[in-house]
Image: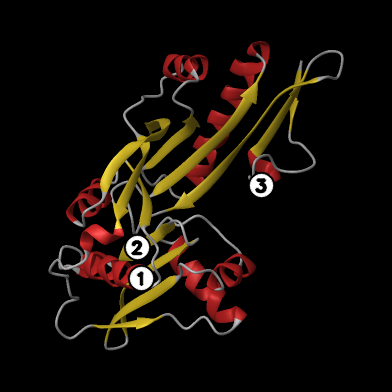
Amino acid sequence: MRIYHPVRGVGGALRENSFTVIDDAGVEIGQGGLQLRNLKRMFPDRPLDVEMTMSAHPAASDTLFGALSARAVSMIAEQKNQPARLYTRCDLDDAARREYFLRMGFDDYDGDELFALNVASRQGRRRNYSPVGTQSIDADLRTRTRREEFLLLLKEYGCVEHASEWLEERMRGPAFVARQVYYGSDFVGALLVTGEQSEAVLDMVCVENKWRGRGVASSLIDEAVERLAQAQVPFLRANAVRRNANAMKLFRRCGFDWIRTDCYLLGRDL
């Protein structure tokens, strides 16, 4: 059995953060990778987020897991040993994967939670407004540079990384809202909603730390709901990481209903 860095990264991970395992006959029996994100704006107390992708034959599982875990520790050391969370996604019905990672010291306290809001049910209710002195505007996405800047801003708060072309395509859809809030020239918060006529998706709502708890996120969601109602889009869907208590409370406060846990986020704090 041999383990090495593949020619290309695994699952979106860089090559140096990826491993492939082959048996004595040269047959691949496992591969995995690590992606690191610094989410200090979302999780100031534990800013490093390290996602492990791993698929292996039982004979290669421990070897691959050991290599990935050791690499995760070195990646965190390169980030001056800031507090981190190492985790992997696991389908709810994948008992074997869940049992393996629990045996390797991961916990199953976290999950990817799905919420949905019935847009019509919010009509006629008192809406939230952003704090006095702030201004909510449509994000300027007219050029590729502006679109990339907007996506980079959202990425800092945990939004999945996308290319400018992805955003440009969704701007042409029936369900699209991109808003930003400022206090003078200071950035306060932002929101991105994309989707189809049948359902919209809240890709991200984010607020600067010092403005949290003052109704900024709620006001942005209410603005998006008004736009969706005008476009006759019936539902707004959103996902939240269970350990992000602020997001979980926000969605419930804004009228979202919890639907289900989409998957486990098995992990451990480092």
Circle 2 sits on which residue?
A: 205
Q: Residue 190 carries which label?
A: 1
Q: In this view, does 201 lie to the left or right of 42?
A: right
- The correct choice, above or below, for 236 with respect to 24 in the image is below
N-terminal label among 1 and 3: 3
Going 26% across and 51% down the picture, which residue do you hit?
256
In what element is the residue under mark 1?
strand
Check contact, mark 2 vs mark 1: CB within 8 A: yes
What amino acid is labelled 3 in the image? Leu
Dots 3, 2 in contact, CB < 8 A: no
> In this orientation, does residue 102 appear?
yes
Q: Quadrant of residue 68?
A: top right
Residue 238 picture location, percent across and down? 37, 51
Q: Where is residue 102 in the image (x, y as percent from the top left)?
A: 42, 18
Relative image position of residue 25 (x, y in whole percent)? 87, 14
Label 2: which secondary element: strand
Vertical position of residue 223 compared to residue 238: above or below:
below
- Looking at marks 3 and 2 on the same chain, the residue that comes earlier in the sequence is marked by 3
Look at discs 3 and 2 and give the one toward the viewer: 2
Q: Which is nearer the eye, 52 or 45?
A: 52
Kindly indicate the quadrant of the structure image that contains residue 1.
top right
Q: Which of marks 1 and 3 is in front?
A: 1
Separation of disc 1 and disc 3 at Cα?
A: 29 Å
* Residue nearer the viewer, 270 or 241: 241
Disc 1 crowd rating (10 Å Cα; few below 14, some 14-19, many 20+) is many
Determine whether 266 is above or below 94 in the image. Answer: below
